[in-house]
Amino acid sequence: MDNREQGDIHGDVPAIAHLGAAPLPAPADGTPTDWSVLPAVRGNEDSVVMELWRLLRQEPALIVSAGYVLLSLLGLWSSYFFYLRFQLSILDYLQISDFLVAGLRDPAYAGILGGGMLLAILVTWPDTLRRRNPDKVEALRARHWAWRVVFSRSWLTSWDISGLRPLTGVSVAVVCYMALGAAIYSLNKAENIRDAGQGTRVVVHLAGDGAPLPGDARLLGSSSAFVFLWWPQQHRAEAVPISAIKRMQSVVVPPTGAVAPAPRPAAAAR
């Protein structure tokens, strides 16, 4: 092999010409940005949350089941605090089927569930982007003070000092937010019915009675076997078996300032 052929070979593989030299880093501008929202901190690989996430990715149908279970648990938690204001132990009146649909009775529970996940993403995403794309984030921080604020290193956006794995910390934060939000929502809803006179007004007809029960009750909710009512006049709540109710009518309250229609005059006798 002559010198020209050897030079061609070395020209094809220039990296071999410098044995032992470290490879040059790729330019930051050419590196694709990693937009993943999963916290990029060491220690997530063997966490329980990551194992569950891998399982859900392998079986996407389980995502619907897991979301349904979480929504049901959130509904039971909210129902407990709601009926607690009326001195009703709701768990004593529920059947197995009621546990499965507890989270579907109010659309606000789905909003609380989604809001908790969104809040966790918004709080932790800047720190996640900073860890996954350090060069690009540092370049942005050098350009303007607003980027330095967004990608600042703070204990509010990082799980380094919490002692928990990042994914575990995010999951615990979401669960705490949902539990607190659902409890506050249920307590406010109950207080509006109990103290402010809100809620659905109903007239109850019991089986075997010719006249309805006196007073306008407030419909608190129902289960598969009971209807829960609040009586503002007596300031008491009760659970009435569905089998004992013949009919229940809602009371339509006219808007404020509305004038009742005048009765039509009787036709003149001929």
Image (cartoon, rainbow, N blue to C red):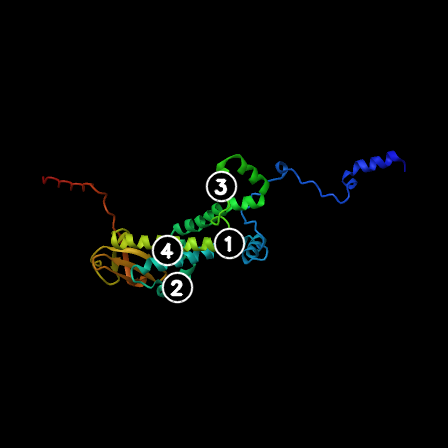
C-alpha separation, residue under disc 4 versus residue under disc 3: 31 Å
Q: Say which residue label 1 marks.
A: 161
Q: Is residue 188 left or right of residue 62?
A: left
Q: Residues within 10 Å of mark 2 (few under 14, many from 20)?
A: few
Q: Say which residue label 2 marks.
A: 95
Q: Say which residue label 3 marks.
A: 150
Disc 1, SS: loop
Dividing the image into 4 quarters, which one contains the C terminus? top left
Disc 2, SS: loop
Q: Quadrant of residue 30?
A: top right
Mark 3 vs 2, N-terminal side: 2
- Nearest to the eye among marks 4 and 2: give it: 4
**Residue 66: % across, % down:** 50, 56
Residue at 85 percent across and 37 percent down: it is 6
**Residue 20: % across, % down:** 76, 45
Along the line of sight, which residue is nearer the eye, 239 or 179? 179
Mark 1 vs 3, N-terminal side: 3
Q: Say which residue label 4 marks.
A: 183
Q: Residues within 10 Å of mark 3 (few under 14, many from 20)?
A: some
C-alpha separation, residue under disc 1 versus residue under disc 4: 28 Å
Residue contact between numbered discs 1 and 3, judged by CB atoms under 8 Å:
no
Disc 4, SS: helix
**Residue 102: % across, % down:** 40, 57
Along the line of sight, which residue is nearer the eye, 242 or 43? 43
Residue contact between numbered discs 1 and 4, judged by CB atoms under 8 Å:
no
